[in-house]
Image (cartoon, rainbow, N blue to C red):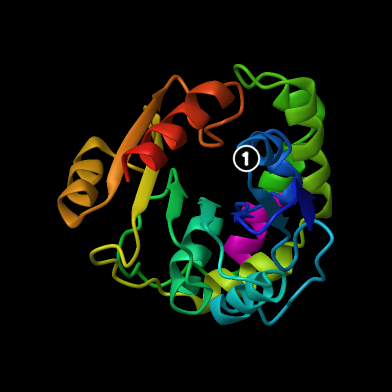
Amino acid sequence: MLTWGSGDRVALLVHGMLGAASQYHEVGPALAARGYRAVAVDLPGHGDARPAPDATMELFVDAVLVDVDTPPALAIGHSLGAIVLSHALPRLRPDRAVYVDVPLSGPSTDPPPAAELRERFTTSRAARTVERLTTRPGWSAEDCRVEAEAAARFDVETAVALERSYVGHAVERPAVPSLVVRAEPSRYVSPERARELEEMGFWVRSVPGAGHSVWYGHLDEFMGVLDEWLEAR
């Protein structure tokens, strides 16, 4: 877990698959400058958290709640972290929620075999080296370093167990004021899905030129979208 700032207004930050709390190394200080105590957690099998070979979504939600001592004023989840956040809402009770580059779609088809998932995650982990990540447009040297370090610590078996046990859930109207921030273009949130989410009551905003980790290389634009939404609500 990493923290920035102090005070009673908590901003909870939940990272994506193969990531860690450190992926918020710029967002956390930016939120602290806005008066929040930003708290970034490590999900099971990521960062400093222990592996969980019997992982389930419920276990991931429990892991998030352990590190939060008060209902957060703001909760931000990226990719897998956004899905975890959506499941945690009834117990977490944040004032507002932000979902980063995730479609929040309904139940998925049956998961691939464990061997196929294991190969996929192992390949993805091996590809996330500093040398390879430096080719990502706009990524800083620190972005590359923290992502490569997170990948090296990522536990494949935890991810396999989670994927095998999770079948998804239908997302209806947001339970709290909610923002979806998508890359533009996005591999995960199509323009059609963005319109569907808006019709459901989500605010949806895009960051042109950004990748899946939207704030890497686009911190000002990402925080600008967040500020606009917070001021409007």
- The foreground one among 189 and 85 is 85
Where is residue 113 shown, x and y percent of the image? 53, 70
Looking at the picture, does residue 206 appear above or below residue 14? Answer: above
Residue 187 in view of the camera:
no
| Count of numbered tags | 1
Q: Can you say whether 106 is above or below 53 in the image?
A: above
Reply above or below: 147 against 83.
above
Q: Is residue 94 above or below residue 189?
A: below
Q: Is residue 133 left or right of residue 169?
A: right
Image location of residue 194, percent across then percent down: 25, 42
Residue 71 part of the magenta-drawn span: no
**Which region of the structure is painted magenta?**
115-122
Q: Residue 184, percent across and down?
A: 37, 27
Residue visible at 79% across and 58% down in the picture: 1
State the image coordinates of residue 183 (x, y, percent, origin top left): 42, 32
Residue visible at 52% across and 54% down?
A: 74
Residue 13 in view, yes or no: yes
Q: Who's the residue at 58% across and 79% down the image?
A: 56
Which of the 4 image quarters holds residue 182?
top left
Q: Are there few (<14), some (14-19), or many (20+) residues within 10 Å of tag 1?
A: some
Which SS does the magenta portion mostly show? helix
Tag 1 secondary structure:
helix
Reading the image, the residue beneath label 1 is 31
Q: Is 164 on the left-hand or right-hand side of 147?
A: left
